[in-house]
Amino acid sequence: MGKPGLARPVRLLPAHLAVLACFAVLAVLPAGARAEPLPAPSWELNDLEGKPRALEDWRGRWVLLKLGTTVCPNCAQELQELAGIDDGLRELGVEVVAIYLGEDRRTVRRYWAKRKAPYRPAILYDPRGGLVRSYGVSVIPRLFLVDPEGRIVWDAGYTPGPELLGVVEGHLAGVPR
């Protein structure tokens, strides 16, 4: 027992911070192309089968990274938006990679088992929440468009499907929005 009148410190994990950010900010982050594309921080995470995957596995292709958690309602909504434009993204050759921050394999597997959704991007999990720091994530869901050279050319929070597809099409055509 601590000293009377003193609150015990609370230890927040990256997933807790991400959830707080999800509920604290209900507005869409300003989306936009970066004036100067930045190299995407490297990472190696496991997929739901336990296979290690790295950002470099997708080098040479356009990748849309979707960062979030299983308990964030806006993150679930973003998945629905992505499902709605999946055919368009596939036609453009864009790979979608969903990364769950601060959550373990078991939690993410249960989440996807409950969803029973036909839409299934590449699914990875980041149990230590390292991407929160390396990508500067303060609000979820967070989207990053990474070009074939491994540079972040666009990042934003929640983005409706048609708008998101338009942004991706613009970047692939060399006319960022």
Image (cartoon, helix red, strand yellow):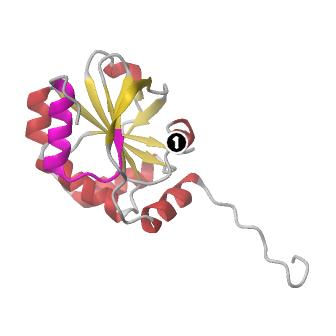
Tell me the quarter of the image containing the N terminus.
Answer: bottom right
Q: Is residue 114 at all visible to an observer of this figure?
A: yes
Is residue 119 visible to the viewer in this orientation of the structure? Answer: no
Q: Is residue 170 magenta?
A: yes
Q: Quadrant of residue 28?
A: bottom left
Q: Which residues are magenta?
A: 155-172
Q: Is residue 56 magenta?
A: no
Residue type pointed to by label 1: Gly
In the image, residue 139 above or below residue 56 = below
For label 1, the residue is 136
Label 1: which secondary element: loop
In this view, 92 is above or below 16: above
Quarter holding the C terminus is top left
Residue 58 percent coordinates (x, y): 32, 21
x 8%, y 39%: residue: 87
Q: Position of residue 166 (x, y in %)?
A: 14, 40
